[in-house]
Amino acid sequence: MYAIYFAYSIFFLGETSFQKVGIAMLRPVQVGFENYRLLFTDPVFAQSIINNLVFAAISIVAALSIAFFIAVALSTGVRGRKWFYLLFLLPALMPVSLVATIFGSMLQERFGILNETLRSIGLGALAQSWLTTPALAYTAVALIFCYLIGLPIMYYTADLSALPTSALEAALLDGAGTWRIMGSIIYPMMRGTHITVILALLLGSFRALEVVLFSTGGGPGTTTEIVGTYLYGYVNSTGKTIGYASAASIVVLIIALGISLVQMYLTRTRKADL
């Protein structure tokens, strides 16, 4: 039943992407590739794709560095590791809309906790319009993406527990230090996890509507616009037809499908190597 529903949805999107379909229109009008032409000549759509990739790249860098080191630290049996693990994993378990709303409230210009704290300690000159200044708003959204590293930590923690100990024991006998073991032995041995994390975050960035919608709303202007907010707000507010929205959805679907196929191929290759 689910397969039939999914197949029908794809067929509907594909069909309407070649039509001019509006709520007030009685019958759809065939327009060929006109919707796609308008889509690819729209600078805002191009910017939303670029923003998606940039935010994905930022979250990937954070995951491959910060999340990895946190996972290694938590795997060493540090005291209170369960509480630290919960602390880092909790944001990933919370609704993304809630996390983004909290960040947005904290960064409000007038009553946000960040600016209020700066004013209370005599640093009011440093208070900024965090969500209405383009560069600062872009940074704020990037920080939210970095904050949601709970799942990469979980991936790394699970894979660390399955690593063979022989190589680590040999390195210790040779007198290798902690940083050398982490950088030269553990990190390369987790190549499969790195690939999984990269592709999962890249694919997840195209489903990150709530991150931007509940923090900056894509603003100021279209500075932090991503594909999700483009489809949600920009298309509807400018009077474009349903066919135009379907064309945009098809393009995003093709990108997501390509990423998924790469992930499946690399996963299969990894299993074959094992």
Image (cartoon, rainbow, N blue to C red):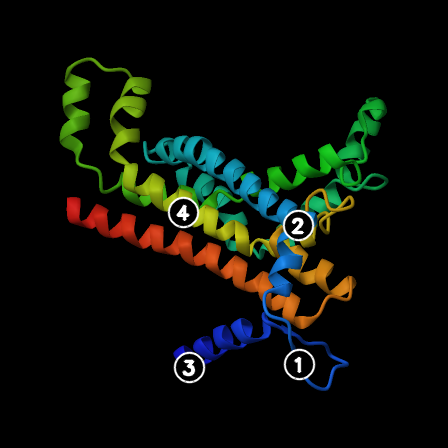
| Residue 192 in view in this figure | yes
User: Is the residue 76 above or below the residue 6 in the image?
Assistant: above
Q: Which residue is mark 3?
A: 4
Q: CA distance from mark 3 to mark 2?
A: 32 Å
- Callout 1: SS: loop
Q: CA distance from mark 1 to mark 3?
A: 24 Å
Q: Position of residue 199 (x, y in %)?
A: 40, 47
User: Is the residue 237 above or below the residue 172 in the image?
Assistant: below
**Residue 28: which numbered mark, if any?**
1
Q: Position of residue 120 (x, y in %)?
A: 83, 28
| Mark 3 crowdedness (10 Å alpha carbons): few <14, some 14-19, many ≥20 | few
Residues at badges 3 and 4 in contact (C-beta under 8 Å)? no
The foreground one among 261 and 95 is 261
Q: Which residue is mark 4?
A: 199
Q: Which residue is mark 2?
A: 212
Of badges 1 and 2, nearer the viewer stands: 1
Q: Closer to the N terminus: mark 3 or mark 2?
A: 3
- Callout 2: SS: helix
Q: Closer to the N terminus: mark 1 or mark 3?
A: 3
At x 80% / y 33%, what residue is drawn? 115
Quadrant in the picture for the C terminus? top left
Quadrant in the picture for the N terminus? bottom left
Mark 2 residue type: Val
Q: Is residue 67 left or right of residue 118?
A: left
Residue 18 sits in which quadrant? bottom right
Residues at badges 4 and 2 in contact (C-beta under 8 Å)? no
User: Is the residue 194 above or below the residue 182 in the image?
Assistant: below
- Callout 4: SS: helix
Q: Closer to the N terminus: mark 4 or mark 1?
A: 1
